[in-house]
Image (spheres, helix red, strand yellow):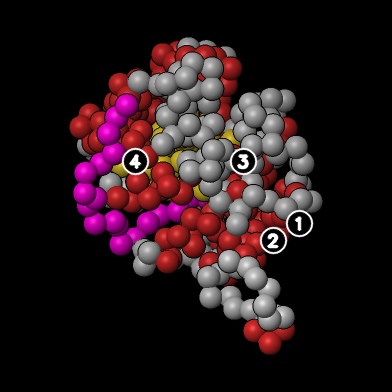
Amino acid sequence: MPSVAPAPATPPRRVHVTEVGLRDGLQNEAVLLSTAEKMALARALVEAGVLEFELTSFVSPRAVPALADAADLVASLRGTRGVHWSALVPNLRGAERALEAGVDSVVLFVSASESHNAKNVNRSVDASLEGFEAVARRLEGSGIALRGAIATAFGCPFEGDVQVEAVGRIARRFADLGAAQLSLGDTTGMATPPLVTERITHLREVVPTLSPTLHFHNTRGIGLANVMQGLALGVERYESSIGGLGGCPFAPGASGNIASEDLVYLLTEMGIETGIDLDGMIAAARIASRLMGRPLPAQVSKAGPRLALSDCSAVPTALGRA
Ligand code: ZN
C-alpha cells in the first residue's frame, strides 16, 4: 500500500474546473436529453462562470445513443466567448468528426487495464495507443489541442489494482504524441488518497511536462477526500459533473462523478479561486435535476451555501436535535 504524502505543499491559489456532466454524466444516465436541453444546461453553466467543458464524445451513436448529437451540440455552442469545448474521440474517424464540428480540443482516451479497454473500445491498450498516432499527425498545425485521458487509472472493475507503472507508460506515450494535459480517470470510484499521491508523484517523475487533471467519481463517497489529496500535492485541474449527474455502469444505483457544485463549494470555502459562482452552479444543478426528472446525488445544491440561513422565528424551540 503506497503511503500518503508527507506535509502538504501549499494548495494552489487557483484551480481549473472542467465540467464533464454533459459527457460522462449523460453517458451513464438512462434519460436521453435533446440537443436543446443540453444547450440550456451548458448555457446555465457558462452563466455560472464555467469556462472549460468536456462536452461530448464522438463515438458510435449506436453504442452511446445519449451522445448521438455530438456534432450538432458542438456546432451550436462553439464560439461562445472565452469557453473551451473539448470532446472525447476513440480514433481518427472520431477526430475527423470532432474537427469538422469545431471543437477546441480533442481528448484521446484509453484504459490503463486491458479488460476495461477491451470492453470500452474493443481493442488492446497498445492497439489504442498505436491508433492515436494518426490522430496526433492529423492535429499537427490545426491549432486544435490534443489531450490525453486514462480510464481505470486508479483501479479496474474487472482486474482490481492497476500498477502505477501501467499509468506511467501510457502517460509517456501521450507526452510523445504532443499532449499538454493528461486526465487520470477514476472510472468506477476506486481512487483513495494514498493512490492519488502515488500516481501524481510517479507522473511527475516520468512525464514532468504533462499537466495532470484529476477526474474522480464519488462511487464510494470519498471523491472530495481525493480532491483534498490532489490539492495538497498542488494539482490544479479537476473534472466534475453538475449535480453529480451520471452513475457507474457496473454498479446500478451507484454515484457518478463528483458533483461540480460540491467541488466549487469546497474550493471556494478554502479560498481557492475558480472563477465560478456557487449560486449559479446551484441554479444549473436544479436545471439538471429537472431535466433528468429525479433528485441528483450532489449535496450543496440541496442544502444551499453554508451561510444560507434559516428564519429563526419560524422554527419551534426545544427540538432536541444535535
Ligand atoms: Zn468518468
Asked if the residue at tag 2 contacts the one at tag 4, i.e. Cβ–Cβ closer than 8 Å, the answer is no
**Mark toward the viewer: 3 or 4:** 3
Mark 2: C-beta under 8 Å from nearest atom of ligand 1: no
Q: Label 1: which residue?
A: 290
Label whose residue precedes the other's in the sequence (3 or 2): 3
Q: What distance separates the C-alpha of mark 1 from that of mark 2?
A: 6 Å
Residue bearing the label numbered 2: 286
- Look at label 4 and name its amino acid: Pro
Q: Is ligand 1 within 8 Å of the beta carbon of the residue shown at mark 4?
A: no
Viewport quadrant of the N terminus: top left
Would residue 193 be counted in the magenta stretch? no
Residue 49, position as x, y percentages in the image: 51, 65
SS under mark 3? loop
Give the mark toward the camera: 4 or 2. 2
Find numbered disc 2 in the image and state the secondary structure of the residue it sits on.
helix
Disc 2 residue type (three-letter): Arg
Whole-angstrom CA distance, mark 3 to mark 4, is 23 Å
Residue 178 location in percent, x, y? 32, 33
* Residue holding disc 4: 212
Q: Foreground mark, 3 or 2?
A: 3
